[in-house]
Amino acid sequence: MKKNITKNKIKENEEKLYINSGLSRIIDDEIVSFHMPGHKNGKLYEKLGYKEKMEKLYKTDTTEIPGTDNLHSPNDIIKESLQKTEAIFDSGKTYYLINGSTCGIQTAIMSTCNPEDKLIMSRDSHQSAINGCILGDIKPIYIKADVDKKTNIQMGNSFKNIKKAIDENIDSKAILLTYPTYYGVTIDLEKVIKYAHEKNIIVIIDEAHGAHLGLSSKLPKTALSCGADIVIQSTHKTLPAFTQSSMMHISKNAIENNIVNIDRIEKILKMTETSSPSYILMQSLEIAVDIYERYGKELIEELYKNIINFKNELNHYKINIKNKLKNENYKLEEIEFFNIYNKDDFTKIFISSLEVGLTGYELEEILRKNYNIQVELSNYCGVLMISTIGNDTNDFKKMKNALISIYEESNLKGRKKLNAINYPNISPKIIFNPREAFYKEKINVKIEESIGKICGENIVPYPPGVCIIATGEIIQKEIIDYLKYCKKEGMEISGLKDSKFEYIQVIEN
Ligand SMILES: Cc1ncc(COP(=O)(O)O)c(C=O)c1O
């Protein structure tokens, strides 16, 4: 280091490392994490003795040289690592994905469907699936997805709607379903897969939120064990891998019976993934698998007990406070305690806040600002906690205490219950396929003037990160009303050129 760089100068330079110093501040705050990634600020690595290895990771950032193998044609250490993972996840073949599940979903779509082929997919599929249809010029056939009226939670697809889509589109090449949904909702996947296979349709499952399902019989069955052909998991979301590290599993059956074309999958992976895959991410995947195998079952049992206690304690509080307020002749209809929704996957906990007189956006902000707790997401009706084997008893205790004191404060402030707003669960009319629409000329029009026109962008409210209206679809008033209302309340919308949501791009027909 040059001698003339004084301590002050170093400090000043550090302040100009904007991302680095911003993230350091967050580490110093020791935020309680009920969000992704699954290692929870690295807490799990420290607890299980991986700390030293993790601290040295930067030294192992390398490229393809003798001894490091090659992700795109593994032959040595990467091959051995993948073989171990295949045995643990009971797959026919597994790929480590370095560009997230996004690249796996796109590879799965483009390797099973040719241009202009039909792909049956849930209307609430992640945006990467629609983008996959743009890239591969594939025609999506949407299955209507259900949304819970009280909470706006994505409930996935019913067997009836899936069967209808298959029966009406028997010439489809593949079906893509999200299992479980972001909120932990599942379906009878075995029944769905059996039906699709009878019709010779390949089953791709977006299991981005379910990499942990194999850890406990109390969790829904894994998509592979239900018979899915291609399964994509975001290992970073619910297991302790670094952000962007995912996996794609191909079932033994799909390989043995040539249901999928492995050669084509590998060719497309070379297009959707970087040619310089990060060894740091690969190592983090391997460590996540190691933790899964060695400690996963024990840790998920601990997590299960923590969640049961958390819910029981809040329930006791709810009953006690109801009785106390009743005795004091308090007007019970004014406010109630939070409602806790714990669907099929017990690790996803949705806390409905409207009963307490708060929107989910407000609750998320209060939790972070006043209690140092960060949840995964908020919608108008509440917040979603993503818990993993990285969370401990203390995290749940802090969340329980925070909820009780937020409720008590709401009571003191005389807040009143709020009503849910309806998610516009409608299927917009499709004028152009995603790819056709993508290449059409677009113009900007005022939001109010866009109704009845063909949408020129993929509008993705977050949460849940799925397209409410896609490029090439007719814009309906209900959708615009919903977006305007939620935007005003604090919802994020991505995919828009005009982030203020005053203008929208439409296709001139
Ligand atoms: C259902 C679903 N599928 C796929 C993805 C994409 O996963 P990744 O971030 O690993 O690319 C997401 C991301 O949030 C998702 O929610």
Image (cartoon, rainbow, N blue to C red):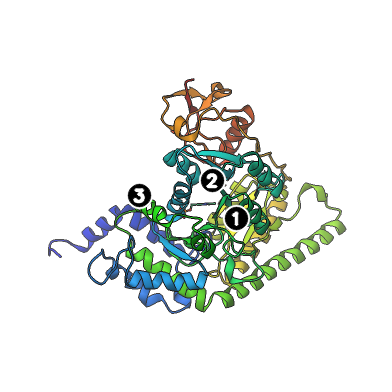
In this rendering, the answer to whether 65 lies above or below 418 is: below
Mark 1 or 3: in front is: 3
Mark 1 closeness class: few <14, some 14–19, many ≥20 residues within 10 Å:
many
Give the distance between the C-alpha atoms of the residues marked 3 and 2, in whole angstroms.
21 Å
Q: Nearer the viewer, residue 253 or 459?
A: 253
- Please name the residue shown 82% across and 61% down the image: 324
- SS at badge 1: loop
Mark 2 closeness class: few <14, some 14–19, many ≥20 residues within 10 Å:
some
- The picture quadrant where one finds residue 14 is bottom left
Q: Which residue is mark 2?
A: 173
Q: Is mark 2 within 8 Å of ligand 1?
A: no
* Relative image position of residue 279 (x, y in whole percent): 33, 65
Q: Inspect this view and state whether residue 37 appears.
A: no
The kind of residue on which mark 3 rests is Met
- The picture quadrant where one finds residue 78 is bottom left
Give the distance between the C-alpha atoms of the residues marked 2 and 1, in whole angstroms.
19 Å
Q: Nearer the viewer, residue 47 or 329?
A: 47
Mark 2 or 1: in front is: 2
